[in-house]
Image (cartoon, grey):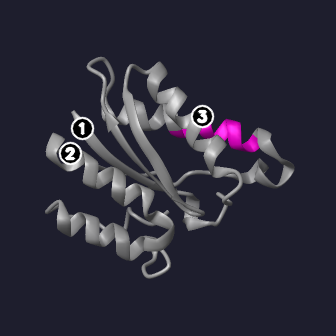
Amino acid sequence: MLLHLVFSTKNRERWLDAPLRPALYGYMAAVGRDLGCEVFRIGGVDDHVHLAIDLGRTVSVSEFVKKVKQTSSVWLKEQSRPHAAFEWQRGYGSFSIGQSQLARLIEYIDGQEDHHRKIGFADEYRALLRKYKMQGDERFMWD
């Protein structure tokens, strides 16, 4: 199953500075591979990440996200004293895509820096919900 996953830092705090991101994404990709998933791309900006993955047959979406968030949170906290208070938001977005959409999703993830010069995370997430024809309850989306 091909998925577009999205999740934010807790309260969209700007923890993920540009120099840190490549190592973080590499770490997250390794965790995904260890779970038997193909990780095509990870990207984002300082307050959230997007992942394009092929979910392995032995892991659920919630298990994948839980493991990636838990282990990357520990990893981030070990990187520097200021990151000791780092947390991911509790929730996440998971959107199923078709093979024909994968290249476009990778391009979208690669363009996050430019994209977020024009739009914030909350508006981007609402647009993703509309694009994938999903409902979201805002009471639970912004922790």
**Structural distance between the alpha carbons of marks 3 and 2:** 23 Å
Magenta region, residue range: 69-77
**Structural distance between the alpha carbons of marks 3 and 1:** 20 Å
Q: Please give the name of the residue rendered at 50% of the width and 79% of the height, measured from the top-left corner.
A: 117
| Residue for badge 3 | 27
Circle 2/circle 1 CB separation < 8 Å: yes
Residue 118 image offset from top left, x and y in percent:
44, 82
Which kind of residue does numbered mark 2 sit on?
Ser
| Residue for badge 2 | 96
**Main secondary structure of the magenta stretch:** helix
Q: Please give the name of the residue rendered at 13% of the width and 63% of the height, measured from the top-left corner.
A: 133
Which kind of residue does numbered mark 1 sit on?
Leu
Which numbered disc flags the more N-terminal residue, 3 or 1?
Answer: 1
Front one among 88 and 114: 114
Residue 136 seen in render: no
| Residue for badge 1 | 2
- Circle 3 residues within 10 Å: few <14, some 14–19, many ≥20: some
39 up-or-down from 36: above or below:
below
Helix, strand or loop at mark 3: helix
